[in-house]
Image (spheres, helix red, strand yellow):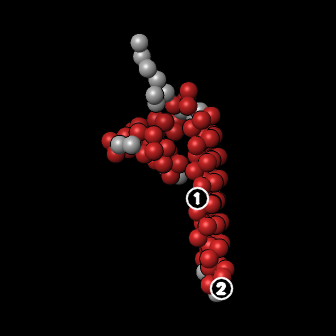
Amino acid sequence: FLWPILLLVMVLFQDLAALKPAFLWASIRRFPKPYAQTSILTCLIMVGQTVLVSGLMTYPLPLFVLVIPLAIYLMMVCLHVVGWLYYAHREALHWFTETL
């Protein structure tokens, strides 16, 4: 459930100090419904990827060669979905707002 927000925090802040549980939960509380939808979607994609990869790994080498690019593509789809989550709700998060 926390994977999308952990990924966003690590990519955008590039600091382990931003992984404080209070910060993560406060961020999730700012947009709970879209975050839950994104979390479910990314979990479904990753479960589908795991099932697909484990099923194709039992076949001979030519099909196995397709497994690695397919797994990378599905991971990129997850990253794209998480990126759109941040893009759509960046104002609600208030992570990088300047105070004058």
> Disc 1 on helix, strand or loop?
helix
Q: Which amino acid does label 1 sit on?
A: Met
- In the visual, does 57 lie left or right of 96? right
Give the distance between the C-alpha atoms of the residues marked 2 and 1, in whole angstroms.
22 Å
Please state which of residues 66 and 41 is positioned toward the viewer in this rendering: 66
Q: Which residue lies furthest to the top in this view?
A: 100
Q: How crowded is mark 1: few (under 14 residues within 10 Å), some or many (20 or more)?
A: some
The residue at which mark 2 appears reads as: 59
* Lower sequence index among marks 2 and 1: 2
In percent of the image, x 67 and y 80: which residue is there? Answer: 63
Secondary structure of the residue carrying numbered label 2 = loop
Relative vertical location of residue 37 with respect to residue 23 in this rendering, above or below = below
* Image spot of residue 25 (x, y percent): 46, 40
Q: Can the viewer see residue 56? A: yes
User: What residue does disc 1 label?
Assistant: 75
Identify residue type, mark 2.
Tyr
Q: Position of residue 99 (x, y in %)?
A: 42, 16
What residue do we see at 45% from left, 40% from top? 12
In which image quadrant can residue 56 be found?
A: bottom right
